[in-house]
Amino acid sequence: MIRVDFNRLRFLVIDDNAHMRRILRTLLHGFGTREVYEAEDGAAGLEGFTHYSPDIVITDWAMPIFDGLELTQMIRQPGANSNPYVPIIMLTGHSEKKRVIAARDAGVTEFLAKPISAKALYGRVLNVVANPRPFIRTKTYFGPDRRRNANPNYAGPERRKGGKADVIKQQPLLDKAKTTA
Amino acid sequence: MSQKKADLAAVSTFADHEVILPPNKLKKAVQKVKPGTRIDFDPVANAEAALAELAEDFSGWMDQECTRLDTARNAMKASGISKRTRDALFLAAHDIKGQATTFGYPLVQPVADSLCRLIEHTPDMMRIPLGLVDQHVDAVRAITHRNTRGDSETNAAKLAEKLRHVTEEFLAHENRDRPEYLESILAPTIAPGEPT
């Protein structure tokens, strides 16, 4: 069985609603986390992300200045920050299908529809910690692999092209950007 | 400066994409527990208990959210519909939609959801019907304040259903020239909530 040692994780919670931030802080402390940082909008969230280097980001979607989707797109910029791979859990009241797809396509790692519960939040954190997904980079996308499962019933063409790949150890993206700048 | 192997991302390059295995920085937090090991700490139960302690504040917080919604409604009526007044009303309704159930007011959630849809999916914001906005805001306040009354549950559900019906009819009419958009906002949610 896998358990998460929350004491070893640093969280950044970004939500414009103070009540929701308090609830999230309470739940995370209840799980055993000590380090929970907060930001009240996307701009402060990006600053907090740079400053605190969180292990996991939990963000709302609808916020003033720039929203959680834009924040995700900014974090998922290879070379723009120290950890473009950081797990991002989007916790939002938006639940429409097109919203879920938009969040996925922006590079969100996990989507969690409000209302929040301890069990659901724990499940999302457990998933990002215990089952990290590879990242995919294409001309139009950089983020966690959007294919969570192989669908045995899929009958269409394979959209990803290319045969056997060469596996090469590479520098982290930020270092690579620095050395080529 | 040389990089530690663990800090390196493994990149597989294909014709039109790369598959990257980032360094696993969260490995430090994974604990493997042998079957049969006694575990004294249940993080979910502990978090639920912590949230229960917070619950005494929830009715006051819900009152604040209702006041915020009412203020946004009044600002829209006084100043007219603009991006500023529309966004303020939407954010207030959206927060109630997301929090009402947590605060112990689940019957409020569908009304706030309907109000969010009305604001978000009316293509010309100047055509957002203020009378229907009023009915939603008044319903949110009424259901919140009568939450503890035994006879209120059925009435609240009926009221929410009626508001939703009127809103969806209005949105269908306003988006009649955008069938794809209409279809997208009527699609059933695929948002994951509680784990099964």
Image (cartoon, coloured by chain):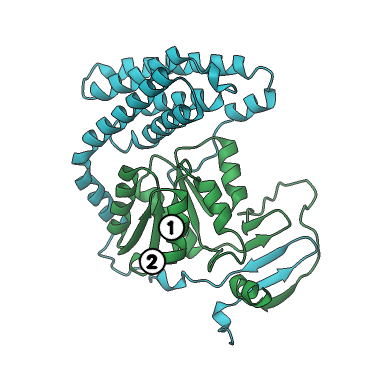
Chain colours: A green, B cyan
| Secondary structure beneath label 1 | helix
Indicate the quadrant containing the N terminus of chain B: top left, top right, bottom left or bottom right. Answer: bottom right
User: Which residue is disc 1 drawn over?
Assistant: A125
Query: Which residue is farthest bottom?
Result: B1
Is B30 drawn above or below residue A139 in the view shown? below
| Secondary structure beneath label 2 | loop
Q: Position of residue B173 (x, y in %)?
A: 61, 14
Please name whichever residue, B134 or B53, is drawn nearer the observer in this view of the structure.
Answer: B134
Q: Position of residue B117 (x, y in %)?
A: 50, 26
Q: Position of residue A47 (x, y in %)?
A: 45, 59
User: Which residue is disc 2 drawn over?
Assistant: A9
Question: On what subunit does the disc labeled 2 rest?
Answer: A
- The kind of residue tagged 2 is Leu
Is A112 drawn above or below residue B129 in the view shown? below
- The kind of residue tagged 1 is Val
Q: Which mark is residue A108?
A: none
Q: Residue at x 53, y 69 (%)?
A: A82
Q: Residue at x 47, y 50 (%)?
A: A42
Left of A78 or right of it: where is A30?
Answer: left
Question: On what subunit does the disc labeled 1 rest?
Answer: A
Mark 1 or mark 2, whichever is nearer to me: 2
Number of labelled discs?
A: 2
Asked if badge 1 and badge 2 are on a common chain, one would say: yes
What is the spatial separation of the Cα atoms under label 1 and label 2, in whole angstroms?
10 Å
Answer yes or no: do the residues labelled 1 and 2 have beta carbons within 8 Å?
A: yes
